[in-house]
Amino acid sequence: MLYLIVIIKNSLNIVYQYSTNDYNVKKNLCDLMFFNKYYSLMEVKEISKICSKPYGFELLILIYFQTKNNADIGIEETYDKLLFNKSQRPAFINFINELEHRGIISRHTSKTKKSKIVLRLSDNLMNKINQRLKINS
């Protein structure tokens, strides 16, 4: 995967250097900035682990915003919100268990419903993401 990322990164640089149309330059510059942010996130070990599944990046985004906004969205609802490359429910739960065991995410009881379990990224990982994306928390 790292090899593919380097190829894409290099090709984006080439596209940026040889574009003459202002729109293409701006678009490719935005693409390159997005890719650089994505690439810097993938350098974080915990994020690489989450993104090791086909639905991982989407899951990361969902749990990031749930954590940031202290949203009351349970594990089942999170699973249902996944749109692309969703695994079977038991495999998803096993993956959540693995992430929890590694300290990447944690489970908390919902404040509105005691039987609902919500997922949160660890504080350490939230700080790493915010630093890499230059987001003030």
Image: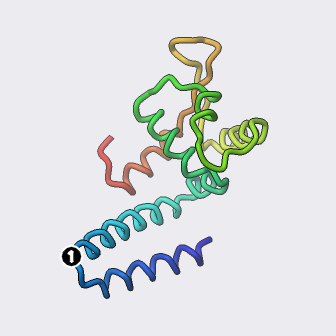
Residue at (38, 85) in percent of width and height: 14
Residue 104 occupies quadrant: top right
**Count of numbered labels shown in the rendering:** 1
Determine which residue is flagged by label 1: 22
* 1 and 98: which is toward the camera: 1
* Residue 41 higher or lower than 69, as above or below: below
Q: Dividing the image into 4 quarters, which one contains the C terminus?
A: top left
Position of residue 101 measured from the top left corner of the image (x, y, whole percent): 70, 40
Colour approach in the figure: rainbow
Specify few, some or many for label 1: CA neighbours under 10 Å numbering under 14, 14-19, or 20 or more.
few
Amino acid marked by disc 1 = Asp
Query: Where is 16 relative to 67, above or below?
Result: below
Quarter of the image that includes the N terminus? bottom right
Taking depth in this image into account, of 64 and 46 the one nearest to the observer is 64
- The residue sitting at 50% across, 22% down in the picture is 72
Quick check: 126 left or right of 87?
Answer: left
Which residue shows up at 61% across the image and 48% down it?
Answer: 84
Q: In this view, does 75 lie above or below 122?
A: above
x%, y% of residue 82? 59, 40
89 or 6: nearer the viewer: 89
- Looking at the image, residue 105 sits to the left or right of residue 128; the answer is right
| Residue sticking out furthest to the left | 22
Residue 15 in the image, given as x and y percentages of width and height = 37, 82
- Where residue 69 appears, as percent x and y from the top left, is 40, 31
